């Protein structure tokens, strides 16, 4: 669900870049020095998982997007983490691109932050692995759905005629929702049982430094 | 079965990259009930050899015959993996389910066993390695020695005919070391055991091979 | 095996200082993204292709990247002319291909290929860690640079851990199918990878503290600016100015 | 300095969780030039003890005195960490910079050395462990043995007065093993060396302690 290089006209790309810059600054301020290794490990995990893990779906397979999970584990820091992961994907594999880097960061990062606000607290307080599964699954579905809407919005803004792409992509994406939800749910339940500290994020939107 | 080897490698060659080969024309036969030791310097290709046997890597040249049939494609190895248990060098690779019970049940479930049969296999295997009662522990919180023994249980629960053990005694304290040693001596399966520890191999195996320069040599004690 | 390798080599492009390469790539990408006319876009594509040749990018991986971009473009080329309203340019099988649609699809395709070629040739050839240090010298916020460098460091550690676990699953007769057992198993794999990595992150922080880290990163590597880098700056500035002339000065760039 | 111990632990107690304590009333003194071995079963708290000494964990009770001063707060330990080198059990935790050179330079730079001085320290330390020429290698492409030796160099580059080594010989093949052994014998620093390998400790240390049930006991060979 990347916006490919060259598709977005300058105005849309610039708007995306501005929004992303704001999110990245907020994310960097929220991230303490001590959390940098943790954020980096999440970035590599997201990058590696989206490249390596293929979940079978019908005759084909899909890769997990994991932005719901990233939000649950990182809060605002998910935005710079996605910036780095997406930059590496563009640089090494040409998924997305550099003029659309800002847009793609918003498409992935904004739903992650939303999931943080929506589900992180209830996950920390829930009483059973089963509840953690459902909360995680809800986060996965919500994030993916929201990402799809942002992606579709950016495409339609880029040119009304691109709406046809959105229509074509709708059905496969609805199918992916279930897989992403189940996957995020299983990961959340696992973390809840084995390493509940993963969901503790020391501080969000703070007033820290950038360097 | 009698004299027909369970496992037969014919002039197997393999290289990880285009660089010099890790294995060059390796021959090896393992018969029922036999325990073979495998030594060799760091990076000499011991782990690579075991991974070739279960089809996790594909040889550049040579033939692999297991249970009397040649094995070439991925689906040839599906049966092999249900009947040959591989203990990984790093126990952290082996255990990935949240609890011990789920992890030990993973293999039997993949073999198509019912939940009850898998449950039964789990308890039997854990009792065999002396870890009964650990069913509900979180795998990640086990100590190094416990991880090693539970890893062994994950193999035994699949009732394999052959065991391939990659440094089963590494990083264990003396009591766990002894438990592993006695367990291996008591198991009926044919085994290939990789280790840097000559004493351990001498106590446990019938004969010992050494991998050097990509070739296997008989080793005398 | 590694999932994070750049296009290594020893060409003149590889030997340039990464800092001016980053700046030139960014300015070039922005200008190309802003332009709308064929002359400038074709010039941009030519510049991209020339850079790719100069950097001697290996053909198979480059083709794969271009295919990834142009696969999408092909869909656009087929769909846009049919679905965009406007005067039909020609019809195939009774489907009217509109002039606006053909134009839009071609422009997007040209832009994308020009940017991808330049981006790959100039930045895809920098060793990744050096890229991080170059960002540092270009005043990218320190935390972001260190996030980038740490991410690189742990990519291969994670990749190896992933391969190890996946092999262990396969060795125990696991076969991916479309069922919950498969999703649960992959979920466990991913979560176990995360747990181990998050704990490692804590130990890494400890290791850094033990070596006197008190919350401020100090960088060791510096770049030398050679004469060839000055030449590169000059040439790329001229090329970019020429590009602006072709696109924005009415009739000016072309005779 | 003479007889004053470099490092002095007085009835130190520690527990990771509310569960039973890992260390109970541990006393330990390390004098200049002394090499102490530390054995103990898996999970007995050896690593924990080393982490307490450099302030990565805080004791529940007891006193830590290092270089003649009591150490309690995080900032008390800043000086300790510049003068006490801790080798981590897993070298992957220790090497976090992209290249070997940067990694070895990380410590000296944090000590406030200039770039030239750091550069000098890097080369000297790498030469000492026999890894000169690896400066520009990518850390994660090193083999296990090389990682271990480079980790050791990262400590030596800081010119510490005390070395705390957590299983420095683990997973090495015989040649690397011997190199580590000779290196440790040739270094002037006081050391605490954790290992499961009694032969190694016998060859390298002056005396050996055993951690069991949270208590330290003298161990005779
Ligand atoms: N995935 C890989 N890609 C490239 N090279 C590899 C890979 N795995 C192993 N190698 C190389 O192949 C050689 C053999 O490795 P292998 O792990 O089989 O050695 P080993 O005998 O098991 O060593 P050890 O005693 O350290 O476990 C080594 O030189 C190693 O660096
Ligand atoms: N972060 C932690 N949280 C909770 N318990 C821990 C933690 N780290 C270690 N432990 C527990 O504390 C005990 C001591 O661990 P430690 O790592 O010090 O043992 P060790 O003697 O170094 O063992 P090994 O020989 O396996 O390295 C173990 O029982 C371990 O499970
Ligand atoms: Mg091995
Ligand atoms: Mg330890």
Image (tube, coloured by chain):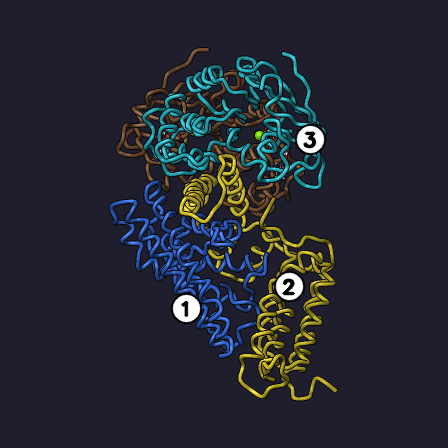
Chain colours: A blue, B cyan, C yellow, D brown
Q: Quadrant of residue D10?
A: top left
Q: Quadrant of residue B104?
A: top left
Query: Which structural element holds mark 2?
Result: helix
Nearest the eye: D97 or D25: D97
Q: Residue at x 69, y 87 (%)?
A: C252
Q: Quadrant of residue A114?
A: bottom left
Q: Residue at x 36, y 47 (%)?
A: A198
Callout 2: 10 Å neighbours few (<14), some, many (20+)?
Answer: some
The residue identified by callout 2 is C66
Q: Where does residue D39 sit, x and y in percent of width and height?
A: 43, 20
The residue identified by callout 1 is A149
User: Which corner quadrant holds the N terminus of chain C?
Assistant: top right
Nearest the eye: C94 or D54: C94
Q: Residue at x 42, y 47 (%)?
A: C179
> Nearer the observer, disc 3 or disc 1?
3
Disc 2 and disc 1 in contact, CB within 8 angstroms: no
Query: Do dots 3 and 1 share one subunit?
Result: no
Q: Determine if residue C147 is in view.
A: no
Nearest the eye: C177 or A95: C177
- Please give the chain letter of the residue carrying mark 3: B
Instruction: Give residue D4's mark.
Output: none
The yes-or-no answer for disc 2 within 8 Å of ligand 1 is no
Q: Where does residue A35 sit, x and y in percent of width and height?
A: 41, 50
- Tell which quarter ligand 1 is in: top right
Q: Where does residue D67 sit, x and y in percent of width and height?
A: 41, 30
Query: Do dots 3 and 2 share one subunit?
Result: no
Callout 3: 10 Å neighbours few (<14), some, many (20+)?
Answer: many
Q: Residue at x 67, y 82 (%)?
A: C246
Query: Which structural element holds mark 1?
Result: helix
How far is disc 3 from disc 2 in space, using C-alphas? Answer: 39 Å
Query: Which structural element holds mark 3?
Result: strand
- Please give the chain letter of the residue carrying mark 2: C
């Amino acid at each position: 669900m990347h916006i490919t290089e060259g598709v977005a006209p300058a105005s849309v790309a610039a708007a995306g870049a501005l929004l992303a810059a704001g999110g990245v600054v907020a994310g960097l301020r929220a991230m303490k020095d001590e959390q940098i290794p943790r954020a980096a490990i999440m970035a590599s995990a997201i990058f590696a998982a989206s490249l390596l893990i293929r979940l079978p779906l019908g005759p084909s397979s899909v890769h997990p997007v994991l932005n719901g999970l990233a939000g649950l584990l990182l809060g605002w820091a998910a935005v710079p983490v996605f910036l780095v992961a997406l930059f590496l994907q563009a640089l090494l594999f040409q998924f997305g691109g550099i003029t659309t880097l800002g847009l793609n960061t918003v498409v992935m990062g904004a739903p992650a932050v939303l999931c943080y606000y929506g589900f992180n607290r209830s996950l920390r307080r829930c009483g059973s692995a089963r509840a953690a599964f459902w909360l995680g699954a809800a986060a996965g579905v919500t994030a993916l759905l929201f990402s799809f809407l942002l992606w579709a919005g950016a495409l339609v803004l880029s040119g009304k005629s691109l709406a046809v792409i959105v229509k074509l992509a709708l059905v496969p994406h609805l199918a992916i929702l279930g897989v992403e939800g189940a996957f995020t749910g299983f990961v959340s339940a696992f973390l809840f049982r084995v390493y509940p500290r993963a969901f503790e994020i020391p501080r969000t939107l703070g007033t820290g430094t950038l360097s | 079965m009698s004299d027909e080897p369970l496992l037969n490698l014919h002039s197997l060659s393999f290289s990880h990259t285009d660089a010099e080969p890790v294995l060059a024309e390796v021959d090896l036969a393992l018969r029922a009930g036999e325990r073979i030791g495998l030594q060799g310097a760091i990076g000499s290709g011991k782990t690579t050899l075991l991974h070739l046997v279960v089809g996790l890597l594909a040889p550049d040249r040579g033939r692999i015959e297991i249970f009397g049939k040649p094995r070439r494609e991925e689906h040839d190895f599906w049966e092999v993996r249900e009947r040959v248990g591989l203990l990984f060098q790093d126990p952290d690779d082996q255990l990935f389910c949240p609890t011990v019970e789920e992890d030990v049940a993973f293999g039997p479930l993949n073999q198509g066993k019912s939940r009850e049969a898998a449950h039964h296999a789990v308890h039997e295997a854990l009792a065999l390695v002396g870890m009964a009662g650990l069913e509900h522990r979180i795998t990640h919180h086990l100590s190094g020695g416990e991880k090693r023994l539970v890893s062994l249980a994950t193999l035994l629960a699949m009732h394999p005919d052959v065991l391939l053990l990659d440094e089963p005694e590494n990083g264990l304290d003396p009591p766990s070391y002894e438990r592993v040693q006695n367990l291996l001596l008591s198991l009926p399966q044919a085994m290939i055991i990789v280790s840097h520890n000559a004493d351990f191999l001498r106590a446990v195996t019938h004969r010992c091979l050494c991998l050097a320069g990509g070739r296997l040599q008989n080793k005398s004690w | 095996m590694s999932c994070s390798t750049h296009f290594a080599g020893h060409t003149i492009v590889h030997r340039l200082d990464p800092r001016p390469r980053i700046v030139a790539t960014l300015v070039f990408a922005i200008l190309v993204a802003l332009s709308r006319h064929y002359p400038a876009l074709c010039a941009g594509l030519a510049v991209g292709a020339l850079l790719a040749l100069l950097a001697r990018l290996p053909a198979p991986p480059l083709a794969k990247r271009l295919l990834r971009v142009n696969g999408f473009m092909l869909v656009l080329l087929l769909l846009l002319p049919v679905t965009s309203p406007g005067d039909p340019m020609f019809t195939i099988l009774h489907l009217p291909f509109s002039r606006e649609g053909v134009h839009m699809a071609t422009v997007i395709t040209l832009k994308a290929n020009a940017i991808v070629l330049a981006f790959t040739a100039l930045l895809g050839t920098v060793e990744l860690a050096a890229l991080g240090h170059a960002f540092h010298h270009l005043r990218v916020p320190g935390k972001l640079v260190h996030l980038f460098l740490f991410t690189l460091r742990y990519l291969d550690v994670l990749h190896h851990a992933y391969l190890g676990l996946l092999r262990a699953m396969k060795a125990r007769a696991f076969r991916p199918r479309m069922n919950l057992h498969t999703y649960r198993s992959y979920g466990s794999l991913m979560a176990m990878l995360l747990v181990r990595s998050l704990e490692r992150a804590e130990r890494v922080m400890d290791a850094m503290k033990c070596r006197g880290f008190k919350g401020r990163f100090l960088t060791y590597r510096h770049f030398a600016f050679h004469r060839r880098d000055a030449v590169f700056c000059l040439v790329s500035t001229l090329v970019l100015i020429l590009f602006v002339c072709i696109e924005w000065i009415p009739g000016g760039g072309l005779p």
